[in-house]
Image: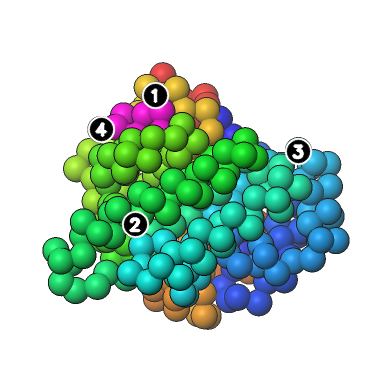
Amino acid sequence: MKFGIHYIYWQKDFSCVSYLPYVKKAKDAGFDALELGDTLFFRISEKDVAELAAAARDADITLALGLDPPAGCSLTSEEEAHRKRGIAFYETAFERMEKLGIRAVGGNMLNAPFTPPYAAHKKREWEYARDSLKKIASAAEEYGMEIHVEIVNRYEGHIVNTAAQARKLLDEIGLPNAKMTLDSYHMNVEESSFTNAVLTAGSRLGHFHLEENHRGLLGTGHLPLYEFRDALRQIGYTGILTMECLVRAGDELADGCRIWRDMTGWADEEELDRQAGESVRAMKYLFSEGRR
């Protein structure tokens, strides 16, 4: 298992122009992986891509990626043109991913808001989701890559909210490289049992986001982290365990993520780095060295 951190941990706004500084931050803190995200992935230049790939190799940091479809690119839209743009949005990522050594793309791929009444659209949207994801997975297969559909809570998605629903959708897609990302924050809202959710995902679990019930740093909330550890051990999970904590208040990213109170004690950059280091040491102890 590799222990990762999402670069968004350090962010408060959308002014970031390079992932490069976060490779060093992740390495210095003690992480094995850095998760990238947002449309910055497409905005950086080819020179930036080459420098990022070299920095990650030199630091022995594995890069991961999560992307949500932007406006007008819904994979489940009634508009065929929107679905086609959404599929192309992911397909255009694969060549750049290959240059960066990224082997899978995740994210809230089914992020479109629901159209009321939900019951009237449910069956059709499920079919659109299945067909769109199958096309993306087929394109990823040509690169030897996977897709990891993130399973989110009811306030951030309406088509798939639980591991059981995701398993059904992925089984209908029927491609071995179509998998899911589970996230402890979202699971805390939707799952009746964390253990059963992980066991249900089984071989279809491609990625895991670990944070507290309020998306804070590990140990600051009430989630039974040992339960996630034991369940992941039961299925033999060896992928990336990403700390995707959203903790900083006071700017546009925080507003968009509904972070109304700062959960770092208004930490400066140095303190944020220190807290990240403490978190990864706790992750490694609990998941690698802790009681079996």
* Residue 105 in picture, x, y percent from top left: 55, 49
Residue closer to the observer: 248 or 271: 248
Which-is-in-front pick, marks 2 and 4? 2
Q: Which mark is residue 128?
A: 2
Q: Which residue range is magenta in the image?
A: 198-204
* N-terminal label among 2 and 4: 2
Name the residue at 76% across, 47% down: 99
In whole angstroms, how far apart are the C-alphas of marks 2 and 1?
A: 30 Å
Name the residue at 19% across, 74% down: 116
The residue where tag 4 is placed is: 196
* N-terminal label among 1 and 3: 3
Q: Which mark is residue 60?
A: 3
The 10 Å Cα crowd at callout 2, few under 14, some 14 to 19, many 20 or more, is some
- Height in image: 157 above or below 136? below
Name the residue at 62% across, 35% down: 144
Classified by dominant secondary structure, the portion drawn in magenta counts as helix
Residue 177 seen in render: yes
- Height in image: 142 above or below 5? above
Label pair 2/4, CB-CB below 8 angstroms: no
In whole angstroms, how far apart are the C-alphas of marks 2 and 3?
A: 39 Å
